[in-house]
Image (cartoon, rainbow, N blue to C red):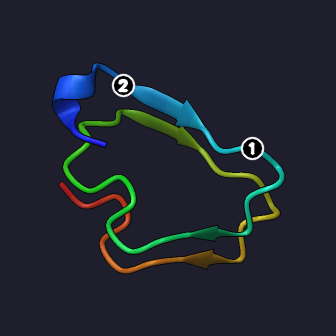
């Protein structure tokens, strides 16, 4: 996902357990809701 796609927030569903490496890298997100079901977040998953 890139900033050009126009998303500024995301709510991860309860069915997600892992967010992969660079999953939202350079996405420009301003708000992220991460549920308790997420037990692993990869390297630079939310880095700008």
Place of residue 8 in the rendered image (x, y in percent of width and height, measured from the top left): 36, 25
Secondary element at tag 2: loop
* Quarter assignment of residue 11: top right
Q: Quadrant of the N terminus?
A: top left
Q: Residue at x 20, y 32 (%)?
A: 3
Is 10 left or right of 29, judged from the image as shown? right
**Helix, strand or loop at disc 1?**
loop
| Residue 35 point in image, percent of width and height | 75, 52
| Residue 9 pos. (x, y %) | 46, 28
Q: Which mark is residue 8?
A: 2
Instruction: Give the x, y percent position of residue 14.
Output: 82, 50
Q: Residue at x 80, y 61 (%)?
A: 36
The quadrant in which residue 25 appears is bottom left
Q: Earlier in the sequence, mark 1 or mark 2?
A: 2
- Residue visible at 73% across and 59% down in the picture: 16
In this rendering, position of residue 43 left or right of residue 5: right
Vertical position of residue 12 compared to residue 38: above or below: above
Q: Closer to the observer: label 1 or label 2? A: 1
Quarter of the picture holding the C terminus:
bottom left
Find the distance from the CA under tag 1 to the CA under tag 2: 16 Å
Q: Residue furthest top?
A: 6
Q: Is residue 44 above or below residue 36?
A: below
Residue beneath disc 1: 13
């Amino acid at each position: 996902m890139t900033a050009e796609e126009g998303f500024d927030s995301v709510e991860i569903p309860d069915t997600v357990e892992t967010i992969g490496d660079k999953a939202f890298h350079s996405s420009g997100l301003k708000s992220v809701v991460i549920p308790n079901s997420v037990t692993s977040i990869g390297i630079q998953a939310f880095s700008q």
